[in-house]
Image (cartoon, rainbow, N blue to C red):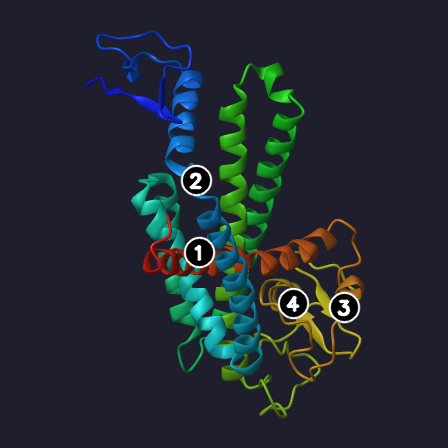
Amino acid sequence: MAGVFEVEVDGVEHDHGLQQHNEPNQFDVSKLSPEEKWRVEHARMHAKHKGHEAMHAEMVLILIVTLVVAQLVLVQWKQRHAKSYNLVTLFQMWVVPLYFTTKLHWWRFLTTWFIFSVITAYISFRATRKPLACTTPRLVYKWFLLLYKISYAIGIFGYSVVMFTLFGINLIFRIKPEDAMDFGVSLLFYGLYYGVLGRDFAEMCADFMASTIGYYSASGMPTKHLSDNICAVCGQPILVDVSEEGIIENTYRLSCNHVFHEFCIRGWCIVGKKQMCPYCKEKVDLKRVFSNPWERPHVMYGQLLDWLRYLVAWQPVIIGFVQGINYILGLE
């Protein structure tokens, strides 16, 4: 049904150059072009917020103070109780986007979220069993490494689409700018979101598996002695020498002379965010381990995902808290 609205600014009713309809100062919104609709909404917004400058300044001040205080609280929480902070952050990373996408009926995201949740739940279940099956560590790291690479590729492709759209390359393929931008931003969101979430789950599984195997403990000495031909991440024998080229995967030696399967140490360092030897805790030089220049962007991408965790997990909570303060104080 067509809607008829009346716009009044500064006590004077305006039609902004729009055609009059039926009664004076009224027009049919359904017959307007997108640009004309935007002009109408713009006029209505100015009429609604006229004379509220002091209130708006107060709201901005509340937002800035809340952001500063929240950042200080989160930093202290992370430093004093890292485990609880990581668990709560992981839960919010998993649930907060689900709430908004369900509300907005983004069925494609909900489908991918459901598939990711089912597979990751199964992988996490396998990683937390005692005794730990000998094939579980490699299964876990392969899954999260695959997820990490897929999210990395999708994120880069989405970013490329956004940049091509800004330079007008989409016009060569006769694609509308808004369609190309929506596609690129959506891919960028998918890549970053699942990249962050996958790394958090991988870190949790890495901690649990390593402590279960016994070659790694968060504090103190390992509970087992590591043999020269055993991988400290998965606890399985090393079949390929460091100097040999493996058919499926190679063997890596760290600066501390401990050797590991390729998939294991990649999952441990890049995906599991553990930049130290799983056995002796000596710091790992990622640039030395992954000397190929094509592999280094994966390390930088992992650091980018860590920076975005605050934006995805805590920013909606902080904004909701600010809106609650504004509501209590009667600010609009």
As displayed, is residue 322 above or below residue 36? Answer: below
Three-letter amino acid code of the residue under disc 2: Gly
What's the CA distance linking mark 3 and mark 4? 18 Å
Residue situated furthest left in the rendering: 1
Numbered disc in front, either 1 or 2: 2
- Residue 281, position in %: x, y? 69, 82
Which residue corresponds to mark 2? Answer: 51
Which residue corresponds to mark 1? Answer: 319
Which residue corresponds to mark 4? Answer: 269
| Mark 3 surroundings: few (<14), some (14-19) or many (≥20) residues within 10 A | some
User: Quick one: SS at disc 4?
Assistant: helix
Counting residues from the start of the chain, the first of labels 1 and 3 encountered is 3
| Mark 2 surroundings: few (<14), some (14-19) or many (≥20) residues within 10 A | few
| Mark 4 surroundings: few (<14), some (14-19) or many (≥20) residues within 10 A | many
Residue for point 37% across, 63% down: 121
Three-letter amino acid code of the residue under disc 4: Cys
- Residue 143 visible to an observer of this rendering: no
What's the CA distance linking mark 2 and mark 4? 56 Å
User: Which picture quadrant has residue 255?
Assistant: bottom right
Numbered disc in front, either 3 or 2: 2
Counting residues from the start of the chain, the first of labels 3 and 4 encountered is 3
Which residue corresponds to mark 3? Answer: 242
Label total for image = 4
- Residue 307, position in %: x, y? 61, 59
Three-letter amino acid code of the residue under disc 3: Val
What's the CA distance linking mark 1 and mark 3? 52 Å
